[in-house]
Image: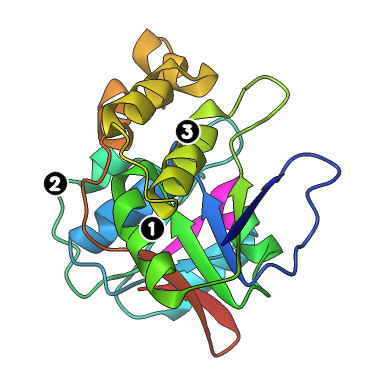
Amino acid sequence: MRFSRVFLNRVQARPTDADTVVVIDVLRSFTTAAVALARGASAIYPVENVSSAAGLAGQMENALSVGAVGGGDPVPGFDFGNSPAQLAGLDLSGRNLVMSTAAGVRGLQRFHHARRLYACALVCARATAAAIRADKPDEVCFVITGEWVDRDGDEDIACADYLEALLCGEQTAAEHYAQRVRDSDFGRRFSAGTWPNLPAADLDLCAQADLFDFAMPVQRENGRLVIR
């Protein structure tokens, strides 16, 4: 099994022909998605364009809109921001979620052509590694979405490092990668307590390795991407 990485926000972050692509967004898109599925959501539809996402949510029965703009502020008019803690206490049984975010969702849309596509965060890393291993791919490409001009993206790089170690059969301590999430540039913004839409409760969820025992494969149904 060969490994490669691309960074979504660099010029060289172009589509890859790798047969398995793992788009990583630890803070917070795919932690939010994992929490929603754990709380009973039927499906999550990642839609990059905010107006298209709002339109799709309006067309679907029993749907909720979830999302944030660059920097983490909620999308105006959406039901929820991109906050896993906000969803953690809800009963989402049978609900569809339409998600629009500036990093994770954009990454899924950019690499939608992959033979196998996964959304991943630290909370479901081990389960994702198990799903990838069962498929026996020749190459796995990790897409780092959290690196920006003002952020090191180490929360996502840590998750990629953890996944690669697991796929290589290494004995590794998950706590080390969880601490890197907390210590990343973006992680420190949550712990600082000075950003109203970046609550510490979100960081506490995002930094829990292997909280859930499911992977999040991304499929295409009726021309749309969907996570179940």
Residue name at image x 41 percent, y 79 percent: 60
SS for dot 2: loop
Mark 1 or mark 2: whose residue is earlier in sequence: 2
Task: Report which residue position mark 1 lands on.
Answer: 129
Q: Position of residue 33 (x, y in %)?
A: 36, 55
User: The residue under label 1 is which amino acid type?
Assistant: Ala
Q: Is residue 168 left or right of residue 116?
A: left
- For the residue marked with disc 2, what is the amino acid? Gly
Marks 1 and 2, how far apart at CA: 27 Å
Q: Which residues are magenta?
A: 98-106
Tag 1–tag 2 contact (CB < 8 Å):
no
Please name the residue that numbered disc 3 is placed on: 158
Res. 196 visible in picture: no
Verify CB contact (< 8 Å) between mark 2 and mark 3: no
Q: Is residue 134 left or right of residue 88?
A: right
For residue 66, which quarter of the picture? bottom left
Q: Position of residue 190 (x, y in %)?
A: 39, 19
Which of the 4 quarters of the picture holds residue 183? top left
Label 2 or label 3, whichever comes before in sequence order: 2
The residue mark sitting in front, 1 or 2, is 1
Check residue 72 in the rendering and tell me which mark sits there, or answer none: none
At a point 31% along the width and 52% down the height, the residue shown is 126
Instruction: Give me the C-alpha separation between circle 2 and circle 3.
Output: 27 Å
How far, Cα to Cα, is label 3 from label 1? 14 Å
- Image quadrant containing the C terminus: bottom left
Residue indicated by mark 2: 89
